[in-house]
Amino acid sequence: MGIRYEAPSGVVSAAPALTVSPLTTRSGLRVAGEVGLATHHVWERALERAVREDGDVYHLELSAVTFIDVAGAGALAAAAQELGAGRRMVLDHPPHALRRVLDMFWPDLSTIEVSVS
Amino acid sequence: MTTAAEPFESDEPFESDGPLDPDGTYESDESRGTVGPLDPFVHPALFYGDEREYLAGTVSFIREGLEAGDPVAVAVPGDNLALIRDGLGADAGAVRLMDMREAGRNPGRIIPGVLRAFADAQPAGRRVRIIGEPIWAGRSDTEYPACVQHEALINAAFTGRAVSILCPYDTRRLAPQVIADAYATHPVVIPAGSGPAAGSEAYAPDDVVARYNEPLPLLADMPAFTYDADSLSQARHVATDIAAQLGLTGVRLQDLALVTAELTTNSVVHGGGSGALRVWAEDGYVVCEVRDKGRLADPLAGRLPAPRDQRGGRGLLMVNLVADLVRVHTGTDGTTVRCWFAC
C-alpha cells in the first residue's frame, strides 16, 4: 500500500498531559491537553471540583483540549447530572469530538451549555 | 497465549484470558437464543418473491398494529420504503419510516440505533411492531457476515419484550444461502405468498453467530503500528494522519479518531495491554483495524443502548454508531475489530 509508519506528525513523544488551571475572571477552569486513559484521573478531579462549587454557572474553558474520548465525555455527563438545582456548566470551545459524543448519548442534558462565541 | 490484564470489568466487554469453550469462539449463554413458549418477543422472517407478496405481508402487519393502537416503525431499503408508504396511503403518517440503507448501513448499529431506539422510546404496556429489512441484494460479501450475525442477535436483544419484528427477505434476488440462514436466525418464518407462519426447525441463532465469526485475513505486507498504554495518543495520531492522507475529512476523520481511541484503549485495559493498529484504503473506504490478545466474550457488546445514568460502557456502542461497517473476529488467539469509513 506504500504506507510507512513513521513518527506521527505533530506528536511529541512524551505521554500526553492534561493541565488544569483556575480561570481568573469568572468561576471555572481552563483545561489543556487531551483526555484519555492516561489523563482520566486529572479530568475527573477537575469535574469533581466543578460539582462542588457554589455559583450558578461554572465555566470549563476547553479550547486547548485536543481530544476527549467517550469515557471522558461520560464523566462530564455524569458530573453535569450531579449539579445542584439551578446550576449549570458552560463549555467554552469544546473539541468537536466532545460535542459529537454528547449529542450521541446525552442530547438533552439541560445542565450543559456549549459556548463557541 | 494471552497476557494477564486487569480483571474483567462488568461495564466493558473485553476479557483477556477467559475460559476456553469447545468451539474456541463464543461463550454460550443458555438464556440466549432460545425462545420459550411464553416469550412475548415475536421475530418472523417474511419471504417475498414480488411486490404484491411484499405489500401483502408488510402492510397487513402494519395495519394490525395501527388498529390495535400500537406504535409501528418500518426500516427497509428506500425503494421498498416507497412501496410501503404508497401501500399505506394516509396511514403512512402514523408510522415511523426509516431508510435502512442509511439507518442500518452498519448492521451492528441496527439493534441499538434503530430497533431498540424505537422500542425503548414507546410507552410501556403497548406491543411495539417493527419491520426491519437489514439484508438486501446489494449487501456485499464483506457486509454479509455482520448482517446475519445482527439478525441472529436480535433474538437475544429482545428476549422477554412485547415486541414484534418482521424481517422481509427477497427470495427472488437473495442467494439460497441467505434464505437458508434466515431459517436459522428466525424462530418463525412466513413463506412467500403470505401463507401461514410456521416454526423454523433450523432455528439456531447462537450457531449462526459462531459460524460467521470469520477470520479477517490481512493483506500481505500491511504495516502495523504496535501500541501499549504509553502510546495510545500516538496510535490515534497515526490513524488520523494516514486516514487524512487517504482522503478522510471532517466529521468522519473525527469519528475515526474516536473509534481508534476506543479500540486501542480497550486493548490496553482488557485485551492484554497492547495491540496492533493498521489503516488502509479499500474500495472507497478507509479501513481501521485493531488486533489484540483479548477475547470478546459477549456478542451483544456494543449493540445495546446504554441507560442514561450508566457512566461507562459506551465505547463499542459508539464504534457501531459511527462506522459504516464493523466486522469482528474473536477467539482464543485474540480479537480483531475492523471498521470501515466511507470517504
Image (cartoon, rainbow, N blue to C red):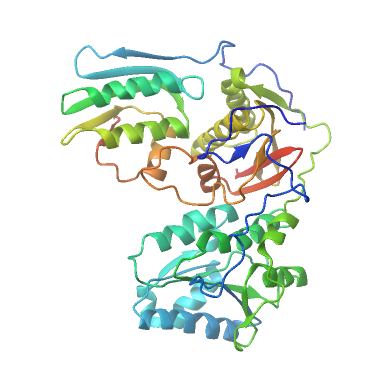
Name the quadrant containing residue A104: top left
**Residue A75's x, y, as percent?**
38, 31
Name the quadrant containing residue A12: top right
> As displayed, is residue A84 above or below residue B140?
above
The one nearer the camera, B290 or B187, is: B187
Relative placement, left or right, of B111 versus A52 is: right
The one nearer the camera, B89 or A56, is: A56
**Residue A80's x, y, as percent?**
29, 34
Is residue B138 in view?
Answer: no
Q: Residue at x 74, y 23 (%)?
A: A4
The one nearer the camera, B249 or B272, is: B272
**Residue B111's x, y, as percent?**
52, 57
> As displayed, is residue B248 above or below residue B326?
above
> As displayed, is residue B71 above or below residue B274?
below
The one nearer the camera, B174 or B38, is: B38
Question: Which of the image's four quarters has the N terminus of chain B?
Answer: top right
> As displayed, is residue B160 above or below residue A29?
below
Relative placement, left or right, of B51 versus B95 is: right
Q: How many marks?
A: 0
Q: Residue at x 71, y 33 (%)?
A: B293
Q: Extreme right residue here?
A: B220
Question: Which of the image's four quarters has the C terminus of chain B?
Answer: top right
Relative placement, left or right, of B154 versus A112 is: right
Relative placement, left or right, of B57 versus A99 is: right
Is residue B9 in view?
Answer: yes
**Residue A33's x, y, as percent?**
44, 17
Q: Residue at x 45, y 80 (%)?
A: B86
Name the quadrant containing residue B36: bottom right
